[in-house]
Image (cartoon, rainbow, N blue to C red):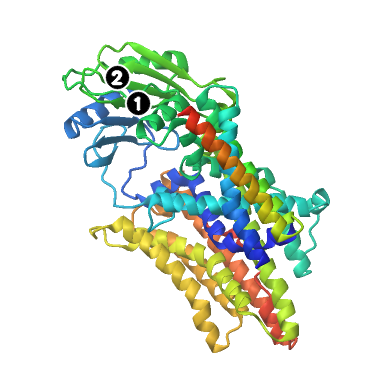
């Protein structure tokens, strides 16, 4: 069960968080729009990898899941506010 | 870390092995294409490029006067023919033209090397998007396996020079380390760039956040990215095209003789036609250079030179180019190929290592888990089964009747049917108490026989066999046949060594010992 929840947190949560971080990065960088988006997309894979490795090196499965879930939710909210304002 | 490396690697290892093998074949895509089209004449010469453009234009205006776009590929060192592609309401089409006469060269219906290497990201029998997501996910597992692998290895540079042969488990680990560490920069580059390649499919949320979900915004993103002008709309007024040879001359004036690789024409015959000339890349990962002309007046609209556009764009373009390796000359191309095979070998040794460790324990306790047996079967069925399937793909190219409907598709079907049989075979045969080692010997022998047979079948079915290709200095075809013989011999040696090991294990009276040994010569010798 602990392995299952970590795996889920790593694959699904990792993807979610990589996207959230990617979007935030693309909105916060100070270049042209296309460049920011491209940079963020290029970076998103390293962020995904880092998140996955972190999930599996966290002390407990619960800690790992919470450590993913909270930034995901907070980040998503920030993204929704920012994108809503931008579009 | 170690857990993540082991299980992450194992879970997608077989698919990654497939991706590495078929992807590696891609570095010789033109050469494989050429072999798989025996109707293609051996060409030493070609007409002047300006003349070829006229021939191509004549052909296209006869065959596809109302097409949305034309593309003309001028001959190069690796691709000796003149190729034309066009797109109309029915989709994309392609013709191969003789580089002197301009006549259509009719070749058999085959997927060729393109179909084979395309499988490493397109897979088969499924929509593209699904395949992209699956392969990207595997790529992500690979990236993580690489990173964790590096972290596990505190003694990475010592291990780099350590190989202790003949020590069973330890030798396997050493082999795995060598195959991983030696071409590590390649492994990292190919994995990361592979992910980047498909990122527009796999990470859509990032650009949607800035450009919205509508097609219009995304098109704006794409054109900003590629620094190409926004697509033009046809006016419907027919006007004749400006002289292509003249534009070629202008471009060659600044790029050098023979350095235009492709001429594309959007809306040919329309008053708003646009012509793009692309510079050939030889032996360097240079930035893309294009000249864009108005299709009727011949006036230069823009000169696209990506040099220094922006760091992220250059990095992106660099990654894509490094992944494809189109710029590579002969030596670098072989290095790419060998690195790719070492990647496949790294994956194969990793999976064998996993199974061997557990087999040792299982033999002590007398109980082998279902997972272990499954992994052992998948190992033999993939590590030797896939090369067998690729040999079958090449054989199918020669043996399927030329008139068969969907012939090219059948070549692929045969590849997958063969692979599936190789996967099922160990499970089926192991019911008869065959030891695993015997199955390895059988499949290695089969692989060896098939690869050795290829040049022979080629001799029976075509007039482009070794006897002819060597005499006419058709080095690409000769090289393919010789490579197949070498691969066949390697599999033969592997089968022989494996057989010896099996016998020595038996003669020592350790029947169990035979079960844990897996061939010494590994998958590093697999097909192109």
Question: Which image quarter: residue B79?
Answer: top left
Residue beneath the point at 47% across and 54% down: B481
Q: Front-most of B109 and B466?
A: B109
Q: Is residue B364 above or below residue B407?
A: below
Question: In the rendered view, does B212 fall on the left or right side of B356?
Answer: left
Counting from the top left corner in percent of width and height, residue B187 is at: 64, 47
**Residue drawn at (57%, 71%) of the image:** B380
Q: Nearer the viewer, residue B186 or B101?
A: B186
| Vertical relation: B289 (above or below) B168 | above
Residue B244 tag number: 2
At horizontal 41% and vertical 63% (from top left) the residue drawn is B415
Q: Say if mark 1 contacts mark 2, CB within 8 Å.
A: yes
Q: Which mark is residue B323?
A: none
Q: Chain of mark 1?
A: B
**Circle 2 chain:** B
Q: Is residue B268 left or right of residue B339?
A: left
**Picture residue at 32% right of the left edge, 30% below the top:** B72
Mark 1 vs mark 2: tell me if same chain: yes
- Secondary structure at badge 1 equals strand
Task: State the residue position of label 1.
Answer: B263
Disc 2 is placed on an element classified as helix
Q: Can residue B524 be seen from the camera position used here?
A: no
In the figure, is residue B396 to the left or right of A25? left
Q: Is residue B158 visible?
A: yes
Residue B495 drawn above or below residue B334: below
Residue B305: percent from the left, percent from the top?
49, 19
């Amino acid at each position: 069960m602990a392995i299952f929840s970590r795996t889920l947190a790593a694959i699904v949560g990792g993807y979610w968080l990589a996207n959230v971080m990617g979007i935030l990065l693309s909105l916060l960088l100070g270049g042209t729009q296309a460049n920011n988006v491209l940079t963020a997309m290029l970076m998103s894979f390293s962020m995904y990898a880092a998140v996955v490795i972190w999930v599996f090196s966290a002390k407990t499965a619960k800690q790992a899941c919470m450590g993913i879930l909270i930034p995901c939710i907070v980040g998503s909210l920030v993204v929704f506010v920012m994108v809503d304002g931008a579009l | 870390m170690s857990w993540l490396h082991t299980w992450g690697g194992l879970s997608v290892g077989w698919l990654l092995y497939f991706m590495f093998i078929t992807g590696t074949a891609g570095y010789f895509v033109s050469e494989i294409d050429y072999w798989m089209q025996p109707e293609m004449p051996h060409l030493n010469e070609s007409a002047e490029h300006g003349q070829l453009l006229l021939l191509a234009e004549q052909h296209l205006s006869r065959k596809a006067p109302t097409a949305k776009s034309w593309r003309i590929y001028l001959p190069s060192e690796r691709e000796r023919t003149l190729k034309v592609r066009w797109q109309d309401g029915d989709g994309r089409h392609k013709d191969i033209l003789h580089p002197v006469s301009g006549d259509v060269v009719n070749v058999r219906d085959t997927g060729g090397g393109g179909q084979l290497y395309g499988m490493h990201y397109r897979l088969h029998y499924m929509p593209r998007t699904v395949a992209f997501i699956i392969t990207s996910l595997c790529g992500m597992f690979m990236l993580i396996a690489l990173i964790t692998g590096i972290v596990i290895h505190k003694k990475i540079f010592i291990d780099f020079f350590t190989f202790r042969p003949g020590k069973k488990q330890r030798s396997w680990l050493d082999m795995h380390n060598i195959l991983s560490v030696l071409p590590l920069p390649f492994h990292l580059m190919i994995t990361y760039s592979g992910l980047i390649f498909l990122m527009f499919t796999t990470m859509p949320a990032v650009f949607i956040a800035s450009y919205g979900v509508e097609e219009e915004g995304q098109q704006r993103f794409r054109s900003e990215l590629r620094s190409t002008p926004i697509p033009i709309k046809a006016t419907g007024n027919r006007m004749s095209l400006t002289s292509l040879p003249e534009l070629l001359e202008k471009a060659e004036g600044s790029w050098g003789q023979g350095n235009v690789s492709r001429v594309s024409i959007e809306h040919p015959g329309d008053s708003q036609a646009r012509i793009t000339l692309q510079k050939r890349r030889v032996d360097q990962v240079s930035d893309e250079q294009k000249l864009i002309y108005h299709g009727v007046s011949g006036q230069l609209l823009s000169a696209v030179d990506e040099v220094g556009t922006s760091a992220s764009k250059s990095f992106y373009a660099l990654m894509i180019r490094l992944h494809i390796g189109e710029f590579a000359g002969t030596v670098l191309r072989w290095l790419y190929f060998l690195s790719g095979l070492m990647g496949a070998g790294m994956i194969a040794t990793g999976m064998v290592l996993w199974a061997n460790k557990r087999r040792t324990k299982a033999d002590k306790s007398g109980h082998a888990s279902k997972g272990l047996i499954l992994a052992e079967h998948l190992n033999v069925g993939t590590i030797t089964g896939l090369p067998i399937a690729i040999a079958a793909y090449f054989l199918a190219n020669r043996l399927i009747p030329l008139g068969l409907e969907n012939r090219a598709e059948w070549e692929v079907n045969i590849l997958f049917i063969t692979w599936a049989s190789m996967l099922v075979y160990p499970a089926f045969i192991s019911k008869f108490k065959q030891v695993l080692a015997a199955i390895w010997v059988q499949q290695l022998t089969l692989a060896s026989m098939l690869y050795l047979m290829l040049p022979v079948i080629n001799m029976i079915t075509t007039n482009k066999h070794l006897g002819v290709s060597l005499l006419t200095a058709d080095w690409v075809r000769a090289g393919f046949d010789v490579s197949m013989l070498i691969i066949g011999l390697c599999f033969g040696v592997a089968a022989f060594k494996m057989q010896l090991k099996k016998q020595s294990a038996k003669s020592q009276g350790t029947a169990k010992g035979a079960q844990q040994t897996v061939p010494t010569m590994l998958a590093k010798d697999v097909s192109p």
